Amino acid sequence: MDAFTAGLLQRIRTTESDLSRARDEGDDFLVEVEQGELDDLRRLAAEHGVEVGASRA
């Protein structure tokens, strides 16, 4: 796995965790921010052929 792929997958995992925490805390604004970031990261992964496992969030 190259550095780009590893870094992208790590950013996705971190964002999924942050999104889950925001949902647990009931922070609707942060949920929207984190969901937008996650959507962007997943789109970037798809554009570069990086397979992302099943979503936790």
Image (cartoon, rainbow, N blue to C red):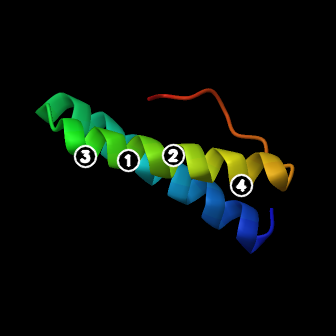
Which numbered circle lies on residue 38? 2
40 displayed left or right of 31: right
Which numbered circle lies on residue 34? 1
Considering only order in the chain, which callout, 4 or 3, is on the residue closer to the N terminus?
A: 3
Considering only order in the chain, which callout, 4 or 1, is on the residue closer to the N terminus?
A: 1
52 displayed left or right of 15: right
Considering only order in the chain, which callout, 2 or 4, is on the residue closer to the N terminus?
A: 2
Q: Secondary structure at mark 4?
A: helix
- The answer to which image quadrant residue 27 occupies is top left
Asked if labels 1 and 2 touch by Cβ distance under 8 angstroms, the answer is: yes
The residues tagged by marks 4 and 2 sit, at their Cα atoms, a distance apart of: 10 Å
Tell me if I can see residue 50 in this picture: no
Residue at the spot x=52%, y=58% of the render?
11
10 displayed left or right of 14: right
Which numbered circle lies on residue 44? 4
6 displayed left or right of 25: right
The residues tagged by marks 1 and 3 sit, at their Cα atoms, a distance apart of: 6 Å
Q: Residues within 10 Å of mark 3 (few under 14, many from 20)?
A: some
Q: What amino acid type should be assigned to the residue bearing mark 3?
A: Leu
The residues tagged by marks 1 and 4 sit, at their Cα atoms, a distance apart of: 15 Å
Q: What amino acid type should be assigned to the residue bearing mark 1?
A: Glu
Q: Secondary structure at mark 3?
A: helix
Q: Secondary structure at mark 2?
A: helix
- The answer to which image quadrant residue 10 occupies is bottom right
Which numbered circle lies on residue 30? 3
Q: Pinpoint residue 47: horizontal percent, then vertical percent.
A: 82, 52
Q: What amino acid type should be assigned to the residue bearing mark 2?
A: Leu
Asked if labels 4 and 1 touch by Cβ distance under 8 angstroms, the answer is: no
Asked if labels 3 and 1 touch by Cβ distance under 8 angstroms, the answer is: yes
Rendered view: 24 above or below 12: above
